[in-house]
């Protein structure tokens, strides 16, 4: 844990669903004191012991150091006025909303001392996620990075277009990989394996292979070659995936579709 991590906050989470909830879980697991966190959610149900949970953005309280916007992009209008009224110059506003541009956020939350976009993914719950960042946070950069580092790999985007591309790859990516696991399991079932066993094998295989790739200095191409014995089984399978760059083409179209939707959403909320 960073020395300064346990001193971060107060942090308010406006919306605490799948994504903000995953971030909170990891922060608490990493040692963030729960009493530094306030969750604002319609149910009023506390997501974790010791976390103050309220139904509406508090009024008349000292502004938080960090306010994480974690609602769906379509809900921005619903929470914007109460959030704008509650923040101050000491507040760093962190938005995880896909497709809502920095300029839109800065205009709505002009009182905030800093406004930044963050694009996490759900594996942050394990501290093995990715967080893309984009914005001008000035002197708050170290504090923001200390907050995000326990979540996994933290990468800054050079510009907002790149931030959207990072969102398509890493923010959406877990869903694409889950589809891949399902597809491998279905293919194993088609070979003749029992479905439950095929899913167990597919999941463990992806977990182990990803760990190997993450811990290796070799490229994925070299690691694939190490699996493929000359004249053996794997090469025949790779030939199918590589034919006409079939897998690469499929994923290029997949990420492009996600990126395009992010740009459409930005236009809709501009
Ligand atoms: N799910 C993911 O993998 C990722 C999601 N995001 C972004 O995270 C945001 C949330 O997405 P999810 O967590 O997937 O959705 P979600 O639907 O699970 O969470 C949204 C939460 O906002 C709450 N909410 C609704 N109205 C509210 C209000 N007026 N005040 C406070 N809370 C309110 C809902 O009760 C819900 O729990 C979206 O903007 C999305 O673009 C970003 C990266 C990855
Ligand atoms: O699907 C979405 O719009 C969000 C952005 C990245 C992951 N989920």
Image (cartoon, rainbow, N blue to C red):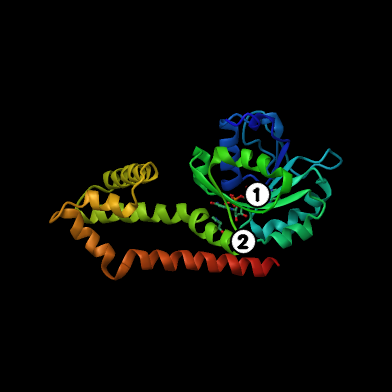
Q: Nearer the viewer, residue 44 or 59?
A: 59
Q: Which residue is mark 2?
A: 159
Beta carbon at label 1 within 8 Å of ligand 1: yes
Label placed on residue 99? none
* Label 1 crowd (10 A; few <14 / some 14-19 / many >=20): many
x and y percent of residue 2 in the render?
A: 60, 31
* Label 2 crowd (10 A; few <14 / some 14-19 / many >=20): few
| Left or right of residue 234: residue 28 | right
- Could you tell me which secondary element the residue under label 2 belongs to? loop
* Residue occupying the point 48% across, 67% down: 256
The quarter of the rendered structure image containing the C terminus is bottom right
Q: Nearer the viewer, residue 159 or 256?
A: 159
In the rendered image, the residue lying farthest to the right is 60
Beta carbon at label 2 within 8 Å of ligand 2: no
The CA distance from mark 1 to mark 2 is 22 Å
Q: Determine whether label 1 and label 2 are within 8 Å by CB.
A: no
Q: How many marks?
A: 2
* Residue occupying the point 32% across, 67% down: 246
x and y percent of residue 87 in the render?
A: 80, 46
Q: Which residue is mark 1?
A: 70
x and y percent of residue 48 in the render?
A: 62, 32
| Left or right of residue 189: residue 56 | right
């Amino acid at each position: 844990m960073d020395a300064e991590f346990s001193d971060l906050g107060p942090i308010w989470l406006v919306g605490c669903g799948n994504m903000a909830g995953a971030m909170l879980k990891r922060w608490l697991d990493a040692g963030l004191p729960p009493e530094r966190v306030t969750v604002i959610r319609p149910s009023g149900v506390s997501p974790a012991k010791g976390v103050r949970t309220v139904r509406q953005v508090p009024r008349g309280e000292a502004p938080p150091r960090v306010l994480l916007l974690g609602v769906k992009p379509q809900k921005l209008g619903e929470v914007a006025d109460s959030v704008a009224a509650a923040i101050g110059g000491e507040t760093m506003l962190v938005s995880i909303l896909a497709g809502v541009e920095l300029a839109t956020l800065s205009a709505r939350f002009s009182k905030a001392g800093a406004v930044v976009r963050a694009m996490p993914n759900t594996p942050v719950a394990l501290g093995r996620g990715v967080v893309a960042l984009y914005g001008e946070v000035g002197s708050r950069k170290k504090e923001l990075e200390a907050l995000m580092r326990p979540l996994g790999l933290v990468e800054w985007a050079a510009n907002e277009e790149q931030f959207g591309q990072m969102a398509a790859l890493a923010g959406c990516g877990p869903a694409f990989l889950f589809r891949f696991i399902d597809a491998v399991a279905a293919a194993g079932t088609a070979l003749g394996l029992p479905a439950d066993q095929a899913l167990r094998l597919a999941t463990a295989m992806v977990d182990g292979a990803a760990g190997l790739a993450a811990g290796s200095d070799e490229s994925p191409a070299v690691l694939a070659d190490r699996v493929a014995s000359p004249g053996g089984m794997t090469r025949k399978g790779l030939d199918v995936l590589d034919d006409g760059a079939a897998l690469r083409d499929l994923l290029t179209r997949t990420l492009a579709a996600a990126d395009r939707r992010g740009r459409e959403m930005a236009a809709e909320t501009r």
